[in-house]
Amino acid sequence: MNTTAVKAFPLYSLGMGLLAAVLYTSGLASFLFLLPLLVVEGRCGYKAMVSAAAAALAVFLILALVFSFGEGSVSLWHGFWLFLPAIAMIIGITVFAHPALRRLDFTPRIMVLGLLAGLASLPVLLQFAAWPEFAVLLDAMLQQMNSYLNTGEMPVADFIVFFRDFLIGFWPAIVFLWLFVSVWMSSRWLRNRVVRASLIPGQVMSPTLLEGLGRQLIGTGLSPLLHLYRVPTYLVWPLLGSWSLLLATRFTAIGPLDALATNLAFALSVCYAVQGLAVLFVKISRTRMAPAAGVILIVLLVITAVGGTSGLVIGVGLALVGTLETWIPFRIQSKGEQP
């Protein structure tokens, strides 16, 4: 923990809370807006994180007040609703980080809070999609897209229906993924700081120091180390049940259960894909390619995210490996892997 930052944490927390609000309203960098809050927690503790979260929420309230005045303004309630998705995520990540909840397993804790934050903000987005102003803005965007890409005319009403169906089917799972990735990114950054602070140029660390560094890394950040990550065994049954429900929708309508199954299947598949990544990391670490393990995993993640069909195949393969580890102990060192 940074002692200087702890002593000045009110000012530091305020600044990081303001940064979180700025990132959320910036557009392209909005997906990073939770990172300042998580970094504050890692460096200064939970109370400092709450202070930073309160500062970000205060900024959102001020912006809602600003939007409620002037020509063409919206009501204060509607102005507040514009920031409700961010508010729900901030509350969710703050509850997730509470010290009393850390004895609970990482995966169900982040998944439940992420899905609840998504559900809490979903009505706001659906209401936003019903505003006449949204239809006007969407029409202008579609016309501009058509002029650049020659995509052809698409009725605004049809696109709004597609947008609503997409929100219902995926928004809670997207919020979960947002929180999940934010926690992993912040934890990795904090651990890299610990490693850099522990290394002395030109000096080899003794086994005792390495062991102490390992314990320190385990206690740093809110996510587990990748090679230690495991999804609780009991979650395999919700995974199989949600995918079974999705398969059933091919033959019969199941109403609201369709959206529930879609969000649950997506969220759990992400968790098991990360477990599959952990298995791959452990296996590579026991080979001559161990020094390049981190680079290999980053390349796989990039391909999975932007690789189209190839990325989908890799993602499904990782999720399958992670799921199979429920019954097959892939990480146990075999005789051929022993030095």
Image (tube, rainbow, N blue to C red):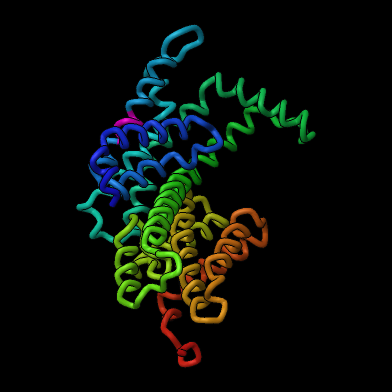
Q: Which residue does the image show at 51% across and 22% down from the upper left?
A: 131
Q: Position of residue 265 (x, y in %)?
A: 47, 57
Q: Is residue 257 visible?
A: no
Q: Which residue does the image show at 29% across and 70% down from the upper left?
A: 212
Q: Is residue 336 visible?
A: yes
Q: Which residue does the image show at 47% across and 63% down from the upper left?
A: 274
Q: Which residue does the image show at 72% across and 26% down from the upper left?
A: 143
Taking the view exactly as shown, the residue that stands out farthest to the right is: 150
- Is residue 121 depicted above or below 113 in this figure? above
Q: Nearer the viewer, residue 296 or 300?
A: 296
Q: Nearer the viewer, residue 102 or 295?
A: 295
- Is residue 219 depicted above or below 182 in this figure? below
Q: Position of residue 206 (x, y in %)?
A: 35, 76
Horizontal side of residue 50 vs 136, given as left or right: left
Determine if the magenta segment contains residue 55: yes
Residue numbers of the magenta segment: 52-57
Taking the view exactly as shown, the residue that stands out farthest to the bottom is: 335
